[in-house]
Structure formats: structure tokens, C-alpha cells
Image: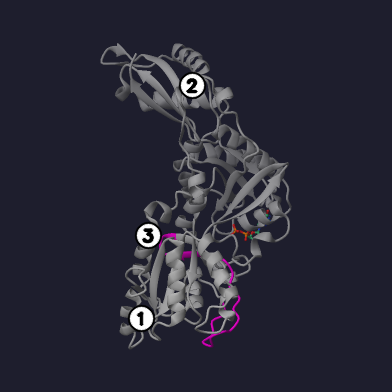
Amino acid sequence: SFKVAIVGRPNVGKSTLFNRLVGQKLALVDDTPGVTRDRRPGDARLFDLRFTIIDTAGLEEAAADTLPGRMRAQTEAAIDEADLSLFLVDAKAGLTPADNTLADLLRRRGKPVVLVANKAEARGSDGGFYDAFALGLGEPCPISAEHGQGMNDLREAIIEAIGPDRAFGKDDPAEEARTDVMLTREEAENPEEAAPYDDTKPMRVAIVGRPNAGKSTLINTLLGEERMLTGPEAGITRDSISVEWEWKGRPIKLFDTAGMRRKARVQEKLEKLSVADALRAIRFAECVVIVFDATIPFEKQDLQIVDLVIREGRAAVLAFNKWDLIEDRQAVLADLREKTDRLLPQARGIRAVPISGERGTGVDRLMQAISDTDRVWNRRISTARLNRWLEAQTVSHPPPAVSGRRLRMKYMTQVKARPPGFMISCTRPDAVPESYIRYLINGLRNDFDMPGVPIRIHFRAGD
Ligand code: GDP
């Protein structure tokens, strides 16, 4: 996401705006100018915008209306680090020489600035608002940080100042996990050489499941310590956050969903599963672990989550949790496997691992399944192998005839990875029956060992 510095002389309302954007009381708000404030960088959100607010701690220590060297240096450092500065002036109190000094400094830096006229709800703030035009930083955006007014205009102004690409995150973490890597012809012909699987790159994993399935418990067991529940954001922000750690030397970036961090807050457990939260975590990840409570499996929400993961094209692994509570394990496992195949045909072959997140049993096997599935999701198969396979497949079970003429499938190649996608040229691409497509997909899954990943085949005209 992009970085924002909130700049302004003391007491213009920087802390109040910070709090509003970050949604937590990190900064101590006080009406007295010069009060020391504990301000830290924060993950901010403004409707659909996400950004980081840069630390400007200490700025408030200076006396009002002056800009001593230290404060100036800190402001400059913040502006330089940021992609955008929100320059706050106090429309109620009017402009002071310190505002002009800061305006000069911002203009000289030449980086995007949004001029914000705060306290615009106050009577008599019109004068300050109009005066702000004279700062030469464009039209001021009137807001009331305290009352949350003008936030829509602020959003617009930010998007305009840095451009929609930046604002909506070409460098969004979700972007990093973007699927659908297209393969060039050379890569498809010789994939092992063109793009070997890189196991030094952090594997992006999300853990999802309905409330009480045991996600937090599992994550805490994986990470050791109650790490998810500590840290400044615990239980407060609703955004996904990530934790980096390692498993057998493989770096892993674990994406936490809202709800996982809230164990400490009992009332939150009553909260319903938010599909939007799950979806966000899924988009950040490459591989998604779907945690089921094995004592009450295959609830409607469980099925919805699996469907979401598959539709998003992610690699998926099932964890049957609370296995310590199961008595007849053989029978239950057989039953769960049967139900998985029957109720989740779209996730056929998905790896399902019984675990006890609480006791830590099965967790290593789960991690192995995740690692294997991620490898499969990245899998590239050479055109030569695919064509040998297609020929064998169509000989043992020929495509049906359409209007008296047998469909012919001549050529097959992998066109994309993450997840794998294939192209087959065919005499009648529009006429390939569903059942034959399923036959090919299941065959690919078995013969090339690709469980737990969505596989797609596109048909193209040609013979
Ligand atoms: P979340 O909402 O998915 O994060 O679920 P929690 O991790 O908060 O767990 C919900 C409840 O299930 C808690 O009371 C846990 O102690 C319990 N629990 C979680 N994992 C296990 C497990 O492996 N075995 C047993 N017996 N209980 C578990």
C-alpha cells in the first residue's frame, strides 16, 4: 500500500485524523499544544483505500507557531518517505506563519500533497478555508476529523493526488499473490528449465474456516507462543495481517483473517463469519487451509468457504480439526473422505489431514500437505508430455461424435500456472460435452498427481 505523512503545525488535529483513519487510540489527543504524543505508524483505511501512516512522533513537542530544526527535520523525513502528504491546517483558528513555512517546505519537495482544512464544521471556519487557497497547494479539502465529516471528499482528493493505480495498489499484497501466470510457448515446451519451482520464496498461506473451527488455536500452535493475539493491532483492525515464519527452512507468510485475533474478546466469538473477510485472506494467499471442526463437519458455511477458495483458483488443503475428540477414527475418517468427494466434487482429490490444533498432532503432516499442494499449484508440464498423455487418453476413451463426426483433439499445451490451465485444440471446441471435460480433468489430476488445485481446460478451434 502507499504511505501517507500527516503534516501540520501543532494542534491542527493531526492526532484526531490519525485516530480516525487508523481506527484505534494509539495517539493521545489533547487540546493543549505541545503535549507529547505517542504516535506510531499505523495501518489506515479510508473506505476502500488502505495505506500506512508514517510516524511523525515528536512533532508536537515543539512550541506552537514555530518550526525548530528538529521538528522540521522530522517533517522533512516523513514527507520524503511518504508517497503523499496530508497537509492539515486549522480552518477555525486560521493560518499562522508556521503554516506558510510548512507549505513552502511541501512545495519545494514537489511530492503529492492534499491540503486539508480541518475543523471545517466549526462556526467561523470559512475564513480559514478561503485563506488556505493562498498557500498555493491547490483547493483545500474541508473536513472535520473529529466528527468524521468530509471523509468522502478526502478519499477523492487522495485518489486524485496519487492516481488510481497507486491508490488501489499495484503493490497491494493481494497483487503479489495474483494467479494466472501465463506461460510463453518456450516455457510450455520446456518448463523445468524455464521456471523451476522456487522454494526460497515465501509461501503465502491463509487459514480460513468458520468461527470456532479452531483457526486461532492452530495458528498459535504453528507459530508457538500466543503471537496472533499480541501486537498493537490485536483484535482491533479488521484487515488481514501477515505473520512471517519458517517451517523446515521454508519461509512462510501466514495471512490472518479477522476473527482469528479476537479470541481474547469473548463477545466477538458470537460474530458471524464474514465472507468478505475470508475472501480477503484468500486473495492474499496462494494456498488456503480450510479448517473444519471434525465433530461438526460439512456445515453449510464450510461448503461455502471451500467453494470460494476453489472459485478463486487457490490451492486448498482441508484440516479436520479437533481430532483428539474423535473416538472411532478409522470410521470417521472414511466417512469424512466419502463426504468430501460427494459434497465437494469441485475440490476432488483435495488433501485432507486430521489434526488437533490444540495438541499439535498432525500439524507437521498438514504443513507437508500445504507445501506439496503449493508445488502442484505452481506445476508446469511440458507440451511433449501433455501431447503423449492426450493421445493415450483419447485412444483409451475417444471423444464422442458430434453431428455424425467424431471430435478430434490434436494438440495440448499448458497455457498458464497458479493454478494450472491447459489448452486443447479441437475440431469443435464448442461441442465438447461436460462429461468428457471431467474425464480429461480427472485424468490430468491422477496422472500428473495434482490434488487440491483447480484445473481448467480451454478448447480452441484447430485440428
Ligand atoms: P476460531 O474461531 O476458528 O479461531 O477457533 P478457536 O481457535 O478460537 O477455537 C474454538 C474452540 O475450539 C476453543 O474453545 C478451542 O479451545 C477449541 N479447539 C480448537 N482446536 C481444538 C482441538 O484441536 N481440539 C479440541 N479438543 N479443541 C479445540
Disc 1 under 8 Å from ligand 1? The reply is: no
Residue 45 is one of the magenta-drawn residues: yes
User: Few, some or many C-alpha atoms within 10 Å of disc 1 (few <14, some 14-19, many ≥20)?
Assistant: many
Residue indicated by mark 3 = 159
- Element under disc 2: helix
Disc 2 under 8 Å from ligand 1? The reply is: no
**In the image, farthest residue toward the left:** 403
In this rendering, the answer to whether 327 lies above or below 21 is above
Give the residue displayed 44% in from the left and 14% down from the top: 394
- Disc 1 to disc 2: CB gap under 8 Å: no
Say whether residue 251 is visible: yes
Where on the image, by quarter, is ligand 1?
A: bottom right
- Element under disc 3: helix
- Sequence-wise first label, 3 or 1: 1
Q: For the residue marked with disc 2, what is the amino acid?
A: Glu
- Element under disc 1: loop
Residue indicated by mark 2 = 186
Q: Nearer the viewer, mark 3 or mark 2?
A: 3
Q: For the residue marked with disc 3, what is the amino acid?
A: Ile
Tell me the quadrant of the picture where the C terminus can be found. Answer: top left
- Sequence-wise first label, 3 or 2: 3
Foreground of the two, 52 or 46: 52
* Position of residue 321 in the picture relative to residue 307 (left or right): right
On the image, which quarter does residue 192 sit in? top right
- Sequence-wise first label, 1 or 2: 1
